[in-house]
Amino acid sequence: MKLLLATLVLSIQLFFAGEAFAHSALLNCFDNADGTFTCQGGYSDGSSATGIRIAVVDKSENILYEAILNSDSEVIIPFPKHQDFTILFDGGSGHSVQITSDVLVR
Amino acid sequence: MKKALLSSLGLAACVLCTAPAHAHFMMTYTPETYMQKAENADFRLVFTHPTEAGSVMDMGGVQEFYAMHKRGDNLKKTDMKKYLKDITWANPGSKAPAYAATIPAKEIRSMGDHVFVLIPGYYLEKEEDVYMQQISKLILNVGGAPTSWNEPVGLPTEIVPMIKPYALWTGNIFQGQVLSKGKPVANAEIEVEYMSNMPNMATNTMPKESSVDYKNPSLVTQTIFADENGVFSFGIPKAGWWGFAALGVGPDTEYKGKGLSQDAVIWVQANDIK
């Protein structure tokens, strides 16, 4: 019986693990030319990223700004004073992705 | 009787002559259908026979050139006609008016699918005394997020892909559905051509040299048919650009008192696994 339960638990874990890794997290940010930039999150299978946390951090990993992606999986963020920063899509383990400010589409 | 016989003979000879001719294809071309992040995209719109760099034809102007893009649940149409510039496209032995456009990165900076649509004017095929209008689609993806690549964009006639046309490996099966006024076209006839003479964007030409040795004319333009649901399948044998043209499937069948073949075209790009 114990063996059966263990097998079931393992099977369920494998099932969810397989599903979880079937897509990749994606992040795209572009300059709005008005002192803000837009970030869009998403997944390679087209899943929504609504509710995912976006963080803007400096070189010392201080958080400069935090926001949650809206119902369109987007958020508008004011440009920080720091010249260089990193934008983090915090989708959790295996689903986080980050880009640096120099690759923003301008 | 004699006249009828001569006419029949003439027609037969003409059919015989035209049988090996290459297919007309409204070429909507940009070098890459995928961008990791938006960059300026260089387009050429040319009505030609892309296989073997055949004749170039006057497409009769551009009625519409735009891109559809979905953000969240909102499908937005962006006019791209304002970026068109007149050019002359020249293939060996033939040249005609065509169009160039540099689409600024700002127009395609949003992640996802940008479905480019070209609705050209009308071309009179003098040999057959019929007009042609090939409504053409090309799907450009930015950032890898799929958004609306497999949705119709509401054209009079169109091919809706069933596999991402910008994410094809060599050997994949490309599937599409032919629609007319949003309804599947049962048994639609589709011509398929490979772009074996790659466009030169700097000179607005196609070279004489082909990357393929065609053993017989039937290999230059392949003909396939859709099933009862308008769905067709084609195995992609080689990396590069493949054009699919569903012939005479549009709802309009007449223009200026002559017959009209209103066709639906889609271009896809296949990649080798390296």
Image (cartoon, coloured by chain):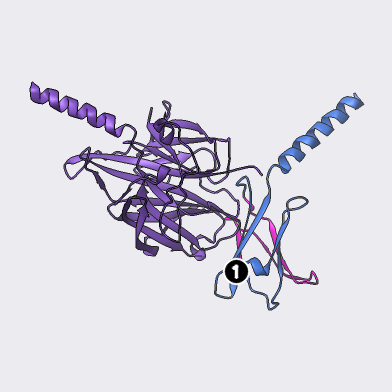
Q: Measuring 37% from the left and 31% from the top, which residue is drawn there?
A: B189
Instruction: Give the tally of numbered discs.
Output: 1
The quadrant of the rendering that contains the N terminus of chain B is top left
**Location of mark 1 (residue):** A37
Place of residue B250 in the rendered image (x, y in percent of width and height, measured from the top left): 32, 39
Could you classify mark 1 by the number of other residues whose Cα lies within 10 Å: few (under 14), some (14-19), or many (20 or more)? some
The residue nearer to you, when weighing B186 against B262, is: B262
Q: Measuring 73% from the left and 43% from the top, which residue is drawn there?
A: A21
Label the purple chain with its letter.
B
Place of residue A56 in the rendered image (x, y in percent of width and height, measured from the top left): 71, 67
Q: Is residue B148 left or right of residue A16?
A: left
Q: Is residue A104 left or right of residue A21?
A: left
Image quadrant assignment for residue B255: top left
Q: Residue furthest bottom?
A: A81
| A42 in relation to B162, above or below | below
Magenta segment includes A73: yes
For the magenta stretch, what is the residue range? A48-76
The residue nearer to you, when weighing B128 against B212, is: B212
The residue nearer to you, when weighing B204 against B254, is: B204
| B209 in relation to A1, above or below | below
Q: Residue furthest top?
A: B1
Q: Element under label 1?
A: strand
Label the blue chain with its letter.
A
Instruction: Please indicate, yes or no, whether residue A89 appears anywhere in the rendered image.
Output: no
The residue nearer to you, when weighing B95 against B259, is: B95
Instruction: Please indicate, yes or no, whether residue B203 appears anywhere in the rendered image.
Output: yes
The quadrant of the rendering that contains the C terminus of chain B is top right
Chain ID of residue with mark 1: A
Q: Is residue A25 left or right of residue A35?
A: right
Q: Give the residue type at disc 1.
A: Phe
